[in-house]
Image (spheres, rainbow, N blue to C red):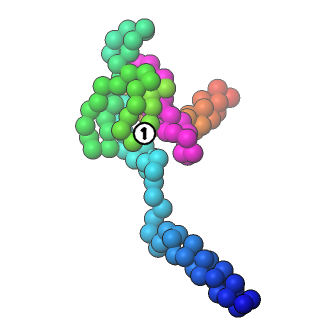
Amino acid sequence: MPGKGWCLLGLMAFFSLASERDPFQPPEDRCQTAQLTRWHYGGAVGHASRWIGILRDNNGKWLRVKENQSLSPGWRVQRLTTEKIEIITGPGCEPAHWIWQRRKGDAHALDKPAIAVAADTESRSTR
């Protein structure tokens, strides 16, 4: 009888390992944060009480967005100004916040995680 218990335990271990993901395949990106660097912020139009942001997605399609709007990968626009847009990528996602910043005089927007933007600002203020 004790042999059957070990056999059953071995079978349960085998099936639990068999359901694991293939280690040779890249992990599923449920947060889709890999495409963050392919999105770009073009600026905003409107006035201080209601800005409409212009955002280009990873397919090159231009979108009009506003604060608290959900974006297709499961992100949400948290803050929007003429200079920058900040999104929340979702629970359990890394990075949790992302900022696309529009700099005056630059031909392209500067895209960084929110933490990197904060660190960049601190390093400029200490110079």
Q: In the picture provided, is 43 more to the left or to the right than 96?
A: left
Q: Position of residue 18 (x, y in %)?
A: 52, 75
Q: Position of residue 75 (x, y in %)?
A: 44, 36
Quadrant in which the C terminus is drawn: top right
Q: Which residue is drawn at 66% across and 80% down?
A: 9
Q: Can residue 3 be seen in this view?
A: yes
Q: Which residue is drawn at 41% across and 18% down?
A: 82
- Front residue (pair 7, 62): 7
Q: Where is residue 97 in the image (x, y as percent from the top left)?
A: 54, 36
Task: Name the amino acid, label 1.
Answer: Gly
- Front residue (pair 32, 115): 32
Task: Tell me the crowding category of disc 1: few under 14, some 14 to 19, or many 20 or more residues within 10 angstroms, Cα based.
Answer: few
Q: Can residue 83 be seen in this view?
A: no
Q: Is residue 89 above or below residue 32?
A: above
Report helix, strand or loop for mark 1: loop
Q: Position of residue 116 (x, y in %)?
A: 57, 38
Q: What stretch is highlighted in magenta?
A: 79-102
Per the image, the residue denoted by label 1 is 74
